[in-house]
Image (cartoon, helix red, strand yellow):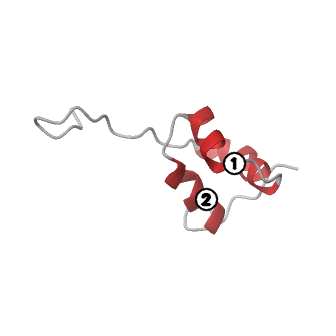
Amino acid sequence: MGRNPGSNRMPSRRIDPADVPEIKRRIQRREFLNRIAADYDVNPGRISEIKTGRRYAEIPAAG
């Protein structure tokens, strides 16, 4: 279900848009992306996409 046959890898979790403001706040506070990613159980690349505006650019950081 969602996995390639013969692969032991699980698909990454998805980031809930409701979590994005807090993630952006943490990025602004210069926290390490890998630590943020670990807290949300996602690949650091997903956090990087938020940082660069590739994803969720329309959602502002938490105040």
**Residue at the image point whose x is 83% and y is 51% from the top:** 29
Does residue 41 appear left or right of residue 8 in this picture?
right
Toward the left, the furthest residue is: 5
Task: Give the CA separation, mark 1 to mark 2.
Answer: 13 Å
Element at label 2: helix
Q: What is the three-letter code of the residue carrying label 2?
A: Ile
Q: Is residue 51 above or below residue 1?
A: below
The x, y position of residue 50, in whole percent, is 61, 59
Comparing 13 with 8, the one in front is: 8
Q: Which mark is residue 50?
A: 2
Comparing 4 with 15, the one in front is: 4
Q: Is residue 47 above or below residue 12?
A: below
Q: Report the quarter where the N terminus lies.
A: top left
The x, y position of residue 6, in whole percent, is 11, 35
**Residue at the image point whose x is 75% and y is 44% from the top:** 22
Does residue 58 appear left or right of residue 42 in this picture?
right
Q: What is the three-letter code of the residue carrying label 1?
A: Phe
Element at label 1: loop
Which residue has dot 1 on it? Answer: 32
Foreground tag (1 vs 2): 1
Comparing 6 with 57, the one in front is: 6
